Image (spheres, rainbow, N blue to C red):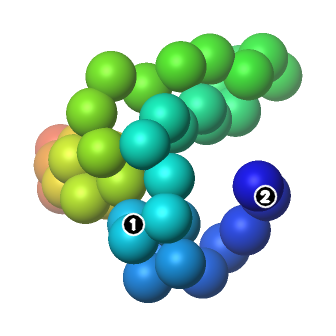
Amino acid sequence: MVSHDEHLIAESVDELRVVSQGKVVPFHGNFRDHKKMLQSLLNQKL
């Protein structure tokens, strides 16, 4: 599934892959973990 719908992803998938540096890579964790990681990275850059 490819989607930008946060709630759909969080409730319906058990494996998450993300695009990073032009490659599709597995993310070890759930969607909420990924969101927290991205927010943390953003906060570090500010």
* Residue under pointer 1: 10
Disc 2 residue crowd, few under 14, some 14–19, many 20+, Cα 10 Å: few
Q: Nearer the viewer, residue 33 or 15?
A: 15
Instruction: Give the quadrant of the C terminus.
Output: bottom left
Q: Which of 26 and 35 is in front in this view?
A: 26
Tally of numbered discs: 2
Q: Which residue is drawn at 53% across and 19% down?
A: 26
Q: Which residue is drawn at 66% across and 73% down?
A: 4
How far across and how far down the image is residue 25, in percent?
A: 62, 17
Please tell me whether mark 2 sits on a helix, a strand or a loop.
loop
* Residue under pointer 2: 2
In three-dimensional space, the C-alpha distance between marks 2 and 1, rounded to whole angstroms, equals 12 Å
Q: Classify 6 as above or below 36.
A: below
Between discs 2 and 1, the one toward the N terminus: 2
Q: Classify 13 as above or below 15.
A: below
Q: Classify 15 as above or below 6.
A: above
Looking at numbered disc 1 in the image, what kind of residue is underneath it?
Answer: Ala
Looking at numbered disc 2 in the image, what kind of residue is underneath it?
Answer: Val
Q: Classify 22 as above or below 43.
A: above
